[in-house]
């Protein structure tokens, strides 16, 4: 039997309603904040990510899926979305519209890392990018949006952590200070971090090896912000305070990608355990220029969909929101199957989610199936009732039933509270 590749996972029908809920709420709140959806290819030239993410990062050195295509081009499955969106922003001249390009995305990413809870080798992200402004209140807006998204989803006990890396000159000063701090421990670092010491010492703070983590915990957090960056960071905090977004400052947060400058942030959620990050983001003011565009500031964030699903899966309001079939058409006798099938179609065309038993079973067996589906109503077609142009409508929650005229059934169902309708009726009535 052929199985899914290690690090990949089927998202089954019982799970997909939760994913659709996350996507729908995301699309709604992103639109409220003025963000529009963009979809970029999952394959790009590998150089795009090497230039943007940094060749000293774990993603580029260990995790990126790279291959040669038939034209001998070096191709990569995208490990993250920001570089692809910046490439699309430049290539399609989105800057010509003026102002800030507010974009959001939903889709799969790929990293060859050890599979773990909430993270697969093919994983999904939902995120936003705001390209075209260095205003610190855009930073505050983006951070607030990430928090509001979690609130709308019903995620509890999450924490926003905030830091500023400063501009490129500030980062160089910080890197030199951290080199001095890490130098006495150089021989105790893992081989990867020994290489990071020369290429980008900040990456040591992201190492997962216990020895390196213990060393990093004892390293003094360095802050060397220039006046402009310090003022920018203070205004970000002023903006967050003004709209009531709670946060804590974490001076050791550096983020795992080289393109970050100035504001960086992360959101953690208590129920996820050690791997508790659900969102990460920050500014990348130099990336557009580095990839061939004009000098354009930008900021964004990404949520891991799997981590969000884990954080939401046990929430009661989410359990109650899982998709259910509203009605079930049952028949007392095979002779009425054709009429039941016509009724089923009428219900669906009216936008009422409906099902029927496609096997020839007893009415009792059909009722058991309806109960298993969790339907609100069962419509029973019996021979005597049908001769009078009636059906029996059974309310599964109230355990009551009544006879209703067949031609008034749909209007009656549509008047019942809590019955969900789809957009199909609008299409049919057109």
Image (cartoon, helix red, strand yellow):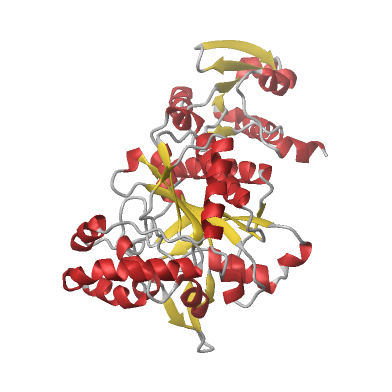
Q: Is residue 78 visible?
A: no
Please name the residue shown 47% across and 37% down the image.
246
Q: Is residue 387 left or right of residue 24?
A: right
Name the image quarter holding residue 428: top right
Residue 79 placed where, x, y %?
45, 66
Residue 300 placed where, x, y %?
55, 56
Task: Decide which of 27, 392 is in the foreground and name it.
Answer: 27
Q: Is residue 18 left or right of residue 212?
A: right
Please name the residue shown 77% across and 66% down the image.
96
Q: Residue furthest bottom?
A: 72
Q: Residue furthest right?
A: 430
Task: Decide which of 48, 330 is in the foreground and name it.
Answer: 48
Residue 91 placed where, x, y %?
68, 74
Task: Decide which of 231, 37 is in the foreground and name it.
Answer: 231
Please name the residue shown 70% across and 14% down the image.
388
> In this rendering, is residue 324 above or below 266?
above
Q: Quadrant of the N terminus?
A: bottom left
Residue 240 placed where, x, y %?
55, 41
Task: Decide which of 199, 53 is in the foreground and name it.
Answer: 199
Count of numbered badges drawn on the protein: 0
Please name the residue shown 60% across and 65% down the image.
85
Q: Is residue 335 visible?
A: yes
Q: Quadrant of the C terminus?
A: top right
Q: Is residue 296 left or right of residue 167?
A: right
> In this rendering, is residue 391 above or below 95?
above
């Amino acid at each position: 039997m052929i199985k899914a590749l290690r690090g990949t996972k089927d998202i089954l029908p019982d799970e997909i309603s939760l994913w659709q809920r996350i996507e729908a709420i995301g699309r709604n709140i992103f639109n409220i904040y003025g963000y529009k959806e963009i979809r970029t290819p999952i394959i790009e030239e590998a150089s795009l990510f090497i230039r943007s993410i940094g060749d000293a990062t774990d993603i580029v050195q260990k995790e990126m899926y790279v291959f040669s295509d038939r034209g001998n081009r070096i191709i990569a499955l995208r490990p993250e979305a920001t570089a692809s969106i910046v490439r699309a922003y430049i290539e399609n001249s989105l800057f010509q519209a003026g102002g800030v390009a507010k974009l959001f995305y939903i889709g799969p990413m790929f990293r060859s890392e050890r599979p773990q809870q909430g993270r697969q080798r093919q994983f999904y992200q939902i995120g936003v990018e705001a390209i075209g402004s260095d205003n610190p209140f855009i930073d505050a807006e983006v951070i607030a949006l990430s928090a509001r998204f979690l609130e709308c989803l019903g995620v509890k006990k999450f924490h926003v952590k905030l830091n500023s890396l400063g501009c490129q000159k500030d980062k160089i000063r910080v890197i030199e200070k951290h080199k001095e701090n890490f130098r006495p421990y150089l021989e105790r670092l893992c081989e990867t971090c020994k290489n990071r010491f020369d290429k980008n010492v900040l990456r040591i703070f992201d190492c997962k090896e216990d020895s390196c983590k213990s060393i990093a915990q004892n390293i003094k957090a360095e802050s060397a912000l220039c006046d402009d960056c310090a003022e920018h960071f203070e205004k970000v905090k002023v903006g967050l305070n003004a709209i009531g977004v709670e946060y804590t400052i974490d001076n050791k947060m550096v983020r795992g990608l080289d393109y970050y400058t100035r504001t960086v942030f992360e959101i953690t959620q208590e129920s996820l355990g050690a791997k508790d990050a659900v969102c990460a983001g920050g500014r990348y003011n130099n990336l557009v220029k580095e990839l061939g565009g004009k000098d354009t500031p930008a900021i964004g964030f990404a949520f891991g969909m799997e981590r969000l699903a884990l954080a939401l899966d046990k929430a009661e309001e989410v359990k109650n929101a899982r998709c259910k079939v509203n009605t079930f058409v049952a028949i007392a006798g095979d002779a009425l199957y054709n009429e039941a099938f016509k009724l089923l179609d009428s219900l669906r065309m009216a936008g009422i989610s409906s099902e029927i038993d496609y096997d020839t079973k007893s009415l009792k067996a059909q009722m058991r199936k309806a109960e298993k589906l969790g339907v609100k109503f069962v419509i029973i077609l019996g021979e005597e009732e049908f001769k009078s142009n009636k059906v029996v409508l059974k309310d599964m929650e109230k355990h009551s039933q009544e006879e209703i005229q067949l031609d008034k059934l749909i209007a009656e169902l549509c008047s019942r509270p809590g019955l969900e309708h789809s957009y199909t009726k609008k299409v049919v009535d057109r």
